[in-house]
Image (cartoon, grey):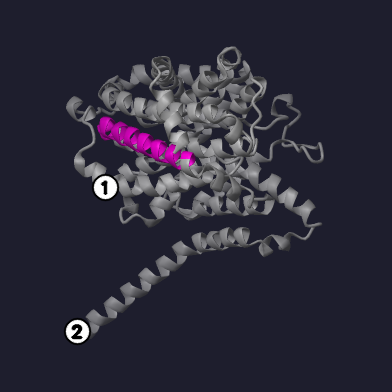
Amino acid sequence: MDTLILVLGFLSDPYHLALIVGGTFVGVLVGALPGLGPVIMIALMLPFVVRMDPVAGIALCGIVYCATTYGGSITAILINTPGTAAAAATTFDGYPLAERGEAGRALGVATFSSAIAGIIGIIVMIIATPLLARLAYQFGPAEYFALAVFGLSMLASISGQSMIKNFIGGAFGVLLATMGTDLTTGVERFTFDQAHLSEGIAVVQMMIGIFAGGELLRQATLTHVKRNIVAEAVARLPSREDFRRIWRTVLRATGIGTFIGILPAEGGTVAAMIAYNEERRWSPNRDQFGKGAIEGVAAPEAANNAATGGTMVPTLALGIPGGGSTAIILTAMLILGLRPGPQLFTEQPDLLAGLFGAMLGANICFLALGMIGARYFSRITLIPTTILWPAVFCLAALGSYSLQQSLFDVGIMLGFAFLGYFMRRHGYAPAPIVMGLILGELIESSLKQSYLIYDGNLFAILQQPIALTFLLLSLAGICGPFIARAAGGWREKQAAEMLRGDDD
């Protein structure tokens, strides 16, 4: 109760309200730019934050973190280019909706889901942070390995028409994750004597190329196709029926995002992928996923925004960053003389209240900004493709170059652009590669750590209850489609035999 009173006190200060509005506006714009995101934005702000009042400075980091996470959905929906890694899953159904002339509807669903999930996630953090921090203690290398395997098992149903092609794409993504110098042995793997590859391939360049570049090349083959998009439909916001359809999805994805966010080194990207796949797995409209299902927009957006609150738990309670953004926030706290840990909750309650209040205010602010701006953002789809996509390509190249000021990164982006184009032509979805790359590094590192901890006996992983649970769920996820197909075939056979008997 004391924390809630402090949060309300923070939000009643005009200076803090101005900070929330300004930070949210800038964060949404930055999040919508491909290649930029919360990590880069907070890093650029760091020299200014450390000169601010500690409460206001850390609060501003939290505001930008929430706003940029949401902002990534705007370009993910409008031009099939996720502004942030956490918005990659939003492209699966958001862009097909935009192609159908329903960009405003998709943006409205994304805004609503993001804000509601973010608000719920932060309220849960305020109330249950100590309890959830203790839960994070239960996860060791074995549990992280099993969780990553569980994520890869979802390739059976993530996207595309062929489960085999999904697993091939995922395996290729895991292979890409092994590129670079092995930190354990110091051996360089798959670098081809290129110093630029010694640290591996960054997810950002790959995603920009495979999504934005691949889509640009596909659009280049469709310049002769006339688009019949009605301007009124483009700017139409979601209906009451749409909100009724997605509220359960938002709640489920919020739970997933909050839980995944609490686990150190996970974050919004993994949470969004898992939430999308779980929604597709259990939805009665699973056939519409990948073609423009609004549940496919609501689930990842709710999960990645709920995870923003979750990632702060290990950062604040354990001093372990929940992701790249929180690692920089943690750095800012240390520079300001703030020591994360259990003592933070008793020694600096005003700091925690400011951070939670700022993140809560940011979610409310971008809810209003998004619902009002959706009508205007959505009109980007009315721009002729001959103008829009060259501009997108310039932004993609700029985003790839800006990370390390390297033309080599731009070349990597172009390589994945051609890869993404040929994948789509031959029925391979890009999502499995992204998921394989994201989870591959976690699988390798946690497996190595487990090997060392259990003296080379990897079967000891099966003796850990949480790890065993995730591995059994993985097995069920892989076998599930085969069992469902066999059961469907058996029912059809029984129905055919019954009809044959009636005819006799």
Within 10 Å of the Cα at label 2, are there few (<14), some (14-19), or many (20+) other Cα atoms?
few
Q: Position of residue 312 (x, y in %)?
A: 55, 35
Residue that numbered label 1 is attached to? 245
- How many badges with numbers are in the image? 2
Of residues 343 and 428, which is closer to you in this image? 343
Within 10 Å of the Cα at label 1, are there few (<14), some (14-19), or many (20+) other Cα atoms?
few
Q: CA distance from mark 2 to mark 1?
A: 40 Å
Magenta part mainly helix, strand or loop?
helix
Quadrant (top left/top right/bottom left/bottom right) for the N terminus? top left
In the image, residue 56 sits, relative to residue 300, either above or below, namely above
Of residues 138 and 279, which is closer to you in this image? 138
Q: Is residue 284 left or right of residue 119?
A: left
Checking the image for residue 502, the label placed there is 2
Q: Can see residue 171?
A: yes
The residue located at (61%, 38%) in the rendering is 317
Q: Which residues are magenta?
A: 99-126
Q: Quadrant of residue 119?
A: top left
Q: Secondary structure at mark 1?
A: helix
> Which mark sits nearer the N-terminus, 2 or 1?
1
The residue located at (50%, 21%) in the rendering is 60
Q: Position of residue 295 (x, y in %)?
A: 33, 45
Magenta-drawn stretch contains 218: no
Of residues 105 and 257, which is closer to you in this image? 257
Q: Position of residue 409 (x, y in %)?
A: 61, 23
Of residues 431 and 43, which is closer to you in this image? 43
Q: Can see residue 217?
A: no
